[in-house]
Amino acid sequence: MQLELKPYTQCRVLIVDDEAMSRTILSSILTPFFSCDSAESGKEAIESCKQIQPDLVLLDMNMPDMNGLEVCEHIKSMPGGQHIPIIFVTSTNDVETQNACWEVGASDFIVKPVTSSTLVHRIKNHLQNKLRMELLAKMTFHDQLTGLYNRLYLTNEVPLMIKQVARDQQKVGLIMMDIDYFKMFNDRYGHLEGDICLQKVASAIDSHVKRPKDAAIRFGGEEFILLLPYTDLAGTKTVADNLIKAVYDLNLAHDSSSKGRVTLSAGYCSQSASHVLEEGISDLIEKADIALFEAKEFGRNRAVG
Ligand code: GH3
Ligand code: MG
Ligand code: MG
Ligand code: MG
């Protein structure tokens, strides 16, 4: 997993101002340090936020279509918008205006004319905080070795997603996977090769994540879960069979296994999301686990539902 903060030059700063001269001045100050985009109205700013997901917004207060306060409120209510720092840059410097900015969620307030170096450093500070928070969130919910989601994600974030699927009266599919004879793999090739094998298998599983709400999770040592919202049993079976084949096709040597290569076994199930909400995600996991046990019993390298 990538644990470094991206460089400032890759951070997207959106400059919002209705006056062309202001946009030009701000752009020329900031372009050497950040990746800048600009918008000349409130509506355009909101559209840009949807399109490019900026890392920070510099926002003018007085604009003809929407004032800065309205734009700020709107951005803060968009998905992911609450994490975008918004800095007001304005010539209006009275206490009421400043307070109104803080109330709608401003991260900072800078009075025109701006001092170039102060502006650049303030932006850098806000960006650093944002990037650190993003990194922490990523570390909290991801497994370090494989980069897949971890169990904390499963227990803390997945129930929220299942609630949405229940509201839509749809099903949730779950595939529980376990690498076959992995203890023998470690014994034969060593623990470090074992780690590399885990990464390759995880990446094969991750490549089956097709939709934004699908989630590949490292459940334990060599056990993985693929969670498929809005998927019935037939759909879940198709994905499970494809996964078994994908890992087989990696053709990773494992001469202590009967197949001569690394293989996967899987158990799968699908249930209505409202049932999962009532019984808990552990019920779904248990069902898949029982099916996984059968897959092992029936000879491994297969999916059972
Ligand atoms: P089965 O086919 O029945 O699943 O047998 P198995 O050997 O795969 O299952 P077992 O549960 O006996 O062994 C799992 C092994 O996975 C043992 C453990 O050392 C290894 N393992 C767990 N986590 C890691 C890890 O992070 N890295 C490596 N290299 N090995 C791990
Ligand atoms: Mg203006
Ligand atoms: Mg296991
Ligand atoms: Mg195993």
Image: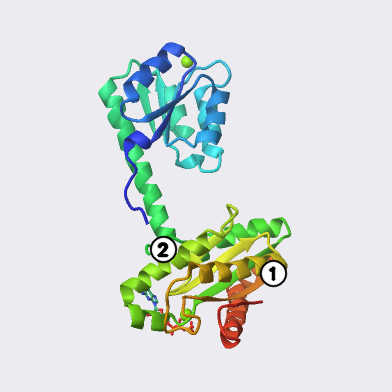
Q: Is residue 232 left or right of residue 126?
A: right
Q: Is residue 213 left or right of residue 62?
A: right
Visible residue check, residue 275: no
In this view, the residue in front, 222 or 78, is 222
Snapshot quadrant of residue 225:
bottom right
* Vertical comparison of 286 with 236: above or below: below
Give the residue pinned by disc 2. Answer: 146
In this view, the residue in front, 146 or 16, is 146
Mark seen at residue 94:
none
Count all numbered tags in the image, as a single digit: 2
Which residue does the image show at 34% across and 25% down from the upper left?
Answer: 30
Q: Is residue 261 left or right of residue 144?
A: right
Query: What colour scheme does the image use?
Result: rainbow
Q: Is mark 2 within 8 Å of ligand 1?
A: no
Residue 85, x across and y down, in percent = 42, 36
Give the residue pinned by disc 1. Answer: 271
Question: Which structural element holds mark 2?
Answer: loop
Which residue does the image show at 68% across and 59% down from the upper left?
Answer: 230
